[in-house]
Amino acid sequence: MPEYSFGKTTIAPDVLITIARMSALDVPGVSRLAPVTGGLNRVFKRGASEGVRAEIEDGLAYLDLYLMLKQEVNVREVSRQVQQRVSRSVSEMLGIEVGHVNIHVEGIDYEV
């Protein structure tokens, strides 16, 4: 029986950014993502409203998320939950190991 090659799979950078963004927004206490420029977003001309900076180096994903949190939440706990959820989602959905998920709390959204 001849050997069969399945070919290769490529993943658009936008897929990684979308998974990270949606995973972060799913964590209770996260209000929204804050604007960010630079990194993969800038290189591929992504909008600054994404809230995620992502790079893949040596097969590892490195993510920085810029968050606005809801009022009266435990910032440390929400940040840890975001790190865990984003890391797990990227690993499970893309099969890419995560080097780090850095959280940058850019502010608190206070309801009027």
Image (cartoon, rainbow, N blue to C red):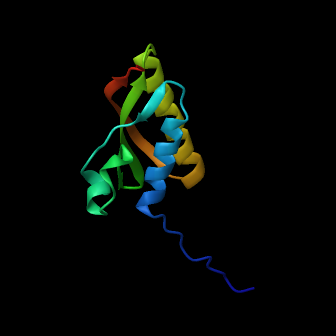
Occupied quadrant, residue 111 = top left
Q: Is residue 106 above or below residue 48?
A: above
Image x and y of residue 62, in percent: 37, 45
Q: Nearer the viewer, residue 55 or 41?
A: 41
| Quadrant into which the N terminus falls | bottom right
Residue farthest to the left? 38
Image x and y of residue 55, in percent: 34, 52
Q: Is residue 99 above or below residue 16?
A: above
Q: Nearer the viewer, residue 66 or 81?
A: 66
**Residue drawn 34% across the image and 47% down it:** 49
Q: Is residue 105 above or below residue 88?
A: above
Residue farthest to the front? 112
Image x and y of residue 79, in percent: 43, 25
**Residue drawn 48% across the image and 37% down it:** 24
Occupied quadrant, residue 67 = top left
Image x and y of residue 10, in percent: 49, 68
Q: Is residue 77 above or below residue 26?
A: above
Residue farthest to the bottom? 2
**Residue drawn 55% across the image and 35% down it:** 26
| Quadrant into which the C terminus falls | top left
**Residue drawn 62% across the image and 76% down it:** 6
Instruction: Count all numbered tags in the image, as a single digit.
Output: 0
